[in-house]
């Protein structure tokens, strides 16, 4: 699946399988604790549960809807990507105007890469591979939400051609944050 993608030797990207659930949960917990340090309240990060993320991952993979990829390095899962139908999330504060004007078909829910594998082209490759899959599933245009203080993710989505189109307040744990939305048309 990665023949035409520009990633270093040893890396591969493929569709996620149920047997990846434990590894994806590990990547999810680990990347939250490293990527959101200093952005999200530390008490929330300290309380993230591997078991909760594993149960969520099994549910996601069992539902078999959306787009789910993993990136591996020498056969070990080091990143994952999830996308599906656009929806506002229960922890987002949304206005009536936003409900009426957000007309994207799809949404990137997650791109998480272990810190030691970032800046290798894995995120770009996951994103590029998913573009055709989202189009094939009728999920274009699509949107990606990112915390306003997550400058690394903002730079990534801007480099991928995203257009800043919206902002919402989001509740994570007991604190409010601002999320911004990037829109992609292809």
Image (cartoon, helix red, strand yellow):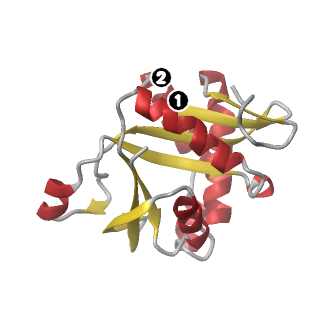
- Where's residue 80, x and y in %? 62, 41
- Disc 1 target residue: 58
- Where's residue 10, x and y in %? 86, 36
Q: Note whether residue 55 is visible.
A: no
Which quadrant of the figure has residue 66? top left
Give the distance between the C-alpha atoms of the residues marked 1 and 2, in whole angstroms.
6 Å
For the point 54% across and 32% down, which residue is it?
A: 68
35 left or right of 63? Answer: right
Is disc 1 placed on a helix, strand or loop? helix
Towards the viewer: 106 or 112: 106
Q: Looking at the rendering, in which quadrant would you find the C terminus?
A: top left
Badges 1 and 2: C-beta atoms under 8 Å apart?
A: yes
- Where's residue 76, x and y in %? 79, 35
- Rendered position, 133 above or below 8: above
Towards the viewer: 175 or 67: 67
Q: Which labelled disc corresponds to residue 62?
A: 2
């Amino acid at each position: 699946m990665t023949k035409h993608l520009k990633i270093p030797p040893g890396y591969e990207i493929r569709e996620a399988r149920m047997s990846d659930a434990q590894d994806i949960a590990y990547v999810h917990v680990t990347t939250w604790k490293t990527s959101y340090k200093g952005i999200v309240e530390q008490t929330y990060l300290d309380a993230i549960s591997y078991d909760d993320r594993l149960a969520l991952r099994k549910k996601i993979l069992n539902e078999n809807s959306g787009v789910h990829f993993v990136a591996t390095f020498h056969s070990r899962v080091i990143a994952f990507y999830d996308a599906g139908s656009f929806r506002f999330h229960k922890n987002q504060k949304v206005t009536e105007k936003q409900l009426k004007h957000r007309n994207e078909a799809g949404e990137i829910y997650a791109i998480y890469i272990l810190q030691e594998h970032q800046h290798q082209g894995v995120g770009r490759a996951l994103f590029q591979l998913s573009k055709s899959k989202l189009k094939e599933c009728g999920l274009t245009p699509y949107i990606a939400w990112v915390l306003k203080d997550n400058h690394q993710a903002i730079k990534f989505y801007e480099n991928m051609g995203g257009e800043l189109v919206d902002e919402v307040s989001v509740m994570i744990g007991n604190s409010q944050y601002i999320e911004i939305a990037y829109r992609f048309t292809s």
